[in-house]
Amino acid sequence: MSQNFSIVVHQLDHFFGTGKLRKQALFNINLEIAAGEIVIMTGPSGSGKTTLLTLIGGLRSAQSGSLRVVGHEICGATENDLVQARRHNGYIFQAHNLHGSLTALENVQMGLEVHRRWAKADRHRQAAAMLEQVGLAERMHYYPGDLSGGQKQRVAIARALVSRPKIVLADEPTAALDKKSGRDVVDIMHNLAKQQGCTILLVTHDNRILDLADRIVYMEDGRLSKQPEPSALP
Amino acid sequence: MMRRFLNALQQRTPLGLKQLKHDPIRLLTAIAGITFADILIFMQLGFADALYKSNTQYPRALQADLVMISSEAKNFGQLSTFARRRLYQSLDVPGVQSADAIYLGSTQWRNPQTGQETSMLIVGQNPEQPALDLPVVNAQLDLLRLPDTVLFDQASRGDYETVIAQVRAGVPVFTEIGLRTVAVGGLFEVGASFSDDGALITSDQNFLRLFGRRDAGAVSLGLMQLDEAADSTQVLEALRDRLPGDVQVLTHAEYIDFELNDIQSESPIGFVFGLGSAMGFIVGVVIVYQVLSTDVNSHLGEYATFRAMGYRNAYLLGIVFEEAVILSVLGFVPGLIIALGAYQLTAAATALPLAMPVSRAISVLLLTFVMCGGSGAIATRRLQAADPADIF
């Protein structure tokens, strides 16, 4: 397995439930994503896209097969290893999931605080610089409740990228946004990620943003196919 | 270690504080709940303590090395009586310097100011010998030699302002006890108890005049002074050998314990106030739990996001306990201040000795921490629901 790949999934199966209710969600997934590559994963809902994303992100523990993320095997990893692994990823969710009691700046610096590497003043400086890059320099001290949907998602992007993660995992980042702000948000994410050289795995139904991808993978019924039929796209 | 902890605390984003500040209504509810619980606990403890103190004020004030009481005695209010010759017998024991009789009784007197009858404790003592450790009384012992003259406790419950002013000005005030007319010749200050609204001190002779049916040979309390060289334990043992079983001799400290013990075990009031404090505590736990668990519930999505970002469960526990500690302090301070005011009001209205010793403030503060920490601990169970796999 080459170091040039930041995500290597090999013969990954995943099951939900136990006993008679046990149901296979992912079947023999094989996927290699090179460092710096932007991959969009698409497919009908319920096909297992999000499950694969949570497994790669270490939010769920993988059961069988092999899953190497930035050189670390996380299949069968302990809870503690998973927590460590999560700190190297940036997450962008469908809902912005910002903390309502924290200002934009404080929310962004939470992405740094988890590393316990920087002093408070330093974290705030880095967070402010990041917010400037997503175009929210004037709204730094606003609470999420006072920001628009697109602005909140941009804060979320700043939070995901502020610690310069190797991998960004995004799940439907444009789902809750209108066309214009959705496009702005993914453009910002794309440009920053390119700047930082980080890998993006993005799950979406939104075919207006497919042009960002270096590669598109298609998932259906828990199986990956790398060349989807154009007619099968949503 | 401590410095590292403080440093870490300073570097940390105070999320608990920010969450609380972000929802002022919820914060106020929690503070009000804790304040209420603390006031309740303070009042119950204050009353219990005032009960103990006010019912042992006279026992505490006795001026004696050893105290003799009937073996039937239950407490200061029900001391029963014993034969005066036991006191004379005690004088035979080497080391006993003096033995004086005290007569105690409760009776109705007519408040000279309002004309209403209230219950007063009457202490009859030998006017030749100080019996109570009250310098104001001992300076006025001469007055007690006059027939039907009493000293009046100016801290008695009720309206006595003009009486006090008049006596201070040197004009005796006359009133009725039973069929007799008595003169209030002087004042002293101790305070009311739960059983009596106040107290009068008079001579043994006057006492027997007021209580016509009491026999001079049946005394309530014996006060014994020892020779300076005498060893009190030896004398005590000798007295216990010498005297029959119808009386008991105690040191002054033992006698105070005897009174306290009686109140704590025999009267339901100690239990009632203990129960009251426990109720206050439980009310506090319920309110704080409600507030904290609602708070955790409404932040579950955000907490799950934090876990996805790599924060540990311990970090989330930290937020809940941070909130618990902040709430404890914010609830305790107004609770303490209001309780101090309520103590003053209650003390003024009831003449009960309500005070706030530092030890009580500290123990209630600790209790508040336990209350909030306990509620926080129950509320953290809801954190299990913050599963990062569910947020995508």
Image (tube, coloured by chain):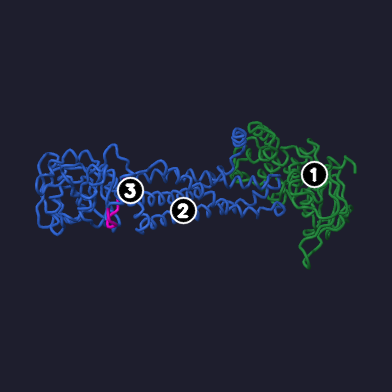
Which amino acid lies under the numbered mark 3 shown in the image of this protein? Glu
Given this view, does label 2 or label 3 mark the residue nearer the observer? 3
Label 3 crowd bin: few (<14), some (14–19), many (20+), radius 10 Å = few
Toward which corner of the image does residue B219 lie, by quadrant? bottom left
Which amino acid lies under the numbered mark 2 shown in the image of this protein? Phe
* Chain ID at mark 3: B
Name chain B's colour.
blue
Q: Which residues are magenta?
A: B243-256
Label 2 crowd bin: few (<14), some (14–19), many (20+), radius 10 Å = many
Q: Could you tell me if the residues under marks 2 and 3 are in contact, i.e. CB atoms within 8 Å?
A: no
Name chain A's colour.
green
Q: Could you tell me if the residues under marks 3 and 1 are in contact, i.e. CB atoms within 8 Å?
A: no
In the rendered view, would you say B220 is above or below A135? below
Does residue A15 show up magenta in the picture? Answer: no
Does residue B252 show up magenta in the picture? Answer: yes
* Chain ID at mark 1: A
Q: Position of residue A26 (x, y in %)?
A: 83, 58
